[in-house]
Structures are given as C-alpha cells and as structure tokens.
Image: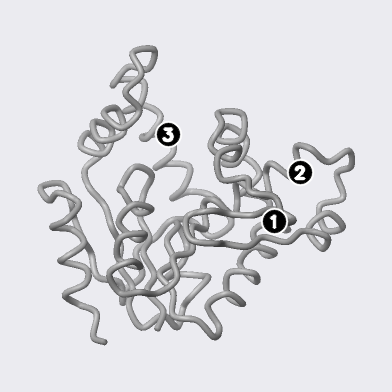
Amino acid sequence: MKIAIDGPAGSGKSSIAKEIAKKLDILYVDTGAMYRAITLKLLKAKETDYEKILKETKINFDGDKIFLDGEDVSKRIRENEISNKTSELSKNKIIRDYLVKMQREIAKDTDVVMEGRDIGSVVLKDAEYKFFLTANVETRAMRRYKQIGDDKVTFDEILEDLKVRDYNDSHRENSPLVKTDDAILIDSTNLNAEETIKKIISYVKR
C-alpha cells in the first residue's frame, strides 16, 4: 500500500504522515529529510561532481532516525545551514532524479506513507491513496511560529518566508507542487492534528 501526502510548507505533512504510519503500522518515509541528508553530504564534499557523489551515497531509515552512509544525521540535517541550502539544491535535476529513484525503490516492496511536494504527481504516481494537505498561509505561519518558539523570529518573517516558498515550490521547473486530479484535498485550517489524521485515515481501506 502506498499513501502519498503532498502539500505546501508548514502544512504539517511530516508530523501527520508520521502519526498515520504509526497508526497503520507501515513505514514512514520523510523525503524532506532525504534531501537534507544529500545537502549535508554535498556541502561536506570537496568536489562538485554530483553524479559521482550520489552513486557513493547510502540513505537509510530506522524509525525516526535517518542515516547517511551509516551515520545518524537526524539532528545535524535540521540545522539552519542545511535548511537554507536544501531548497536551492533540491531544484537540481540530477539530485531530484536520484532521490526519486531511491524513493520508488523503498516503496516498491513495502507499505509506505510518503510525504513531500511531488509524491503523488511524480514519485508515486501509482499510489492507491493520494492526499493534498493544506491550510491557509496565515494558519501555517502561526503554527510554525508557535513550533519554533524563538523570540528572534517574528510571525511576519515566517509568513513572508512561507509566501515565498509557496511561490517557488509551485513555479519551479522540475516537479512543481501541484494537486493531482486524483488527490483528495484536506484543508486543515480549522482542524487540529488529531482531527486531520482521523480524516485521512477514514479514506484508507485496510
């Protein structure tokens, strides 16, 4: 069984997908973490031959942890330096093609919940269940503001950042963020996390 969850930044895809995987007892694949792990590797590399570097790269999941070439990088990939560079590098076609292939391999013989920006439209076009999770940008910004809990970052800064990311994600040349015709729209503007999870699971037949 393949469940694809797409949506804009700050829509809660990661936390929602993770909980759905737990409740259904299937594998959760954090595609964003995979891009972050690749970004970490490329930043540490002394060369720019992406194809050569990627061929020598291994990414594995173990529960909530992600391993890059055997090293647990779960915390390292969340640092600002990595966050700031991931969006830029994820536009690279060589990197995207490599990770799409890896993501498809993971899902080939395993029940998965996979979330991202292009799962239903590109990575898992054959997914039995496709969802497009969203909320209005003000709601997403407020949720992220509360999550960060840092006085150095204002709500308005987060709001503007999300607006820019929304535009970039939906207008990028490779694999733009789109809702496919067969995806179920889940608007969580007026739903809490548990309500959103229940709504999505209600569509899934075991």
Q: Quadrant of residue 66?
A: bottom right
Q: Disc 3 marks which amino acid? A: Val
Residue drawn at x 36%, y 20% is 157
Q: Kindly identify which residue carries mark 1.
A: 95
> Please, what secondary structure does the residue beneath circle 2 have?
helix
Q: Disc 1 marks which amino acid? A: Ile
> Please, what secondary structure does the residue beneath circle 1 have?
helix
Residue drawn at x 51%, y 70% is 122
Binning the other alpha carbons within 10 Å of mark 3 as few (below 14), some (14 to 19) or many (20 upward) gives: few
3 or 2: tag closer to the N-terminus: 2
Residue drawn at x 23%, y 85% is 205
Q: Are marks 2 and 1 in contact (CB under 8 Å)?
A: yes
Q: Is residue 3 above or below residue 192?
A: below
Q: Kindly identify which residue carries mark 2.
A: 42
Q: Nearer the viewer, mark 2 or mark 1?
A: 2
The spot of residue 3 in percent (x, y) is 37, 74
Q: Quadrant of the C terminus?
A: bottom left
1 or 3: tag closer to the N-terminus: 1
Which labelled disc corresponds to residue 164? 3
